[in-house]
Amino acid sequence: MLVTLIVCALAGCGGSAAAGDGEGEASKAAAEAAPLLDQIEAAIEKRDKLEAARLLRELEARVPGDAKVGALREKADALAWPERTKIDLGSGVTMEFALIKPGEFVMGSPEGEVGRTYVETQHKVKLTKHYYMGVTELTQAQWKAVMGTAPSFFEGDTLPVERVSWNDAVAFCKKLSETTGATTRLPTEAEWEYACRGGTSGARYGPLDEVAWCGEKGRLTAHRVGGKKANAYGLHDMLGNVEEWCSDWYGPYAVNDTGVQDPTGAGTGRWRVLRRGAWWGDAHDCRAAFRASFEPSFYLLSIGFRVARAP
Ligand SMILES: [Ca+2]
């Protein structure tokens, strides 16, 4: 019923003159958008908030500013965020994400943490928006499904993609967004550390051997993603296996007494942020607060990334 009402409101049905007069541009756009209304209703019925939001963005692009769409928007907004969501990449390849809720945490490490460096200045950070993080590092199968190439040194569908630069990672997220309609990107450094900690405040979210491929036992090769214990948010290999690009330019943290809200890093710079540890690395690098950086065109057989998804 709601769909019918909105289509009629947008397209102007119900009058006998309308049928024979031909459609104007606005009513034509509304009529073309009508199938979207059914799809939005179906998404809301299935309580798929992300799909409803995506379709609503598409609808509003076609019939901008129409108040009639507000009813659907209200219904979609009232839905709860799903704890997990997937993107289907075709041929049986999917990408799974875990919900990360807004919150506050202390970013950086305390003086005295073993392996600490001076760039890990502790400071309060508040993240105000929901976002999703890839449950695993991006795999080679996922990379190939989107980009059609195989850049990695260690070959295997379930291994993390590596030998990808920051520029490559950004290009992947852009293409993934364009082809699926999902809004995907690299996480900010703050989003990465908040998700990595999973509510913990120590150097790691669990005993090193249980949670990370790092150091002597993980040396010489990348490992199948998800092989180590996940953190409290359901994320695997945040520490260890491959290093992960973040969106920020690298620079000293912005620190103030009251806390920093939704930081996005330095305004400009030469290097992009990279978070470790790595399969080749040592335990000192394998900490939630550890920071590394490289030029955006740099790539290495231990560097991959993880995709973040905005609602
Ligand atoms: Ca990792």
Image: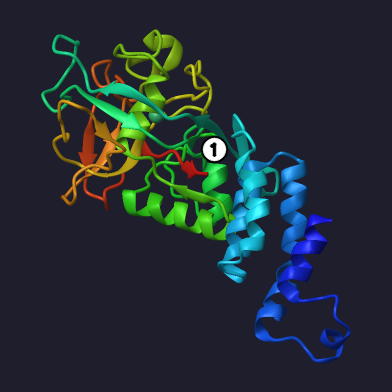
Residue reaching furthest bottom?
21
From what the image shows, is residue 174 above or below residue 124?
below
Residue 207 horizontal side relative to residue 282, left or right = right
Residue 32 horizontal side relative to residue 140, left or right = right
Q: Where residue 200 sits: x, y (%)?
A: 37, 13
Q: Residue at x 82, y 76 (%)?
A: 13
Disc 1 on helix, strand or loop? loop
Quarter occupied by the N terminus: bottom right
Q: Where residue 165 sits: x, y (%)?
A: 33, 49
Q: Where residue 216 sits: x, y (%)?
A: 33, 15
Q: Where residue 51 sits: x, y (%)?
A: 65, 48
Residue reaching furthest left?
118
Q: Residue at x 35, y 19 (%)?
A: 214
Q: Residues within 10 Å of mark 1 (few under 14, many from 20)?
A: some
* Quadrant housing residue 207: top left
Rendering quadrant holding ligand 1: top left
Q: Amino acid at mark 1?
A: Gly
Is residue 85 visible from the viewing direction of this image? yes
Asked whether 309 or 256 is in front, the reply is 256
Asked whether 295 or 185 is in front, the reply is 185
Asked whether 226 or 119 is in front, the reply is 119
**Residue tagged 1:** 156
From what the image shows, is residue 36 above or below residue 280?
below
Is residue 241 visible from the viewing direction of this image? no
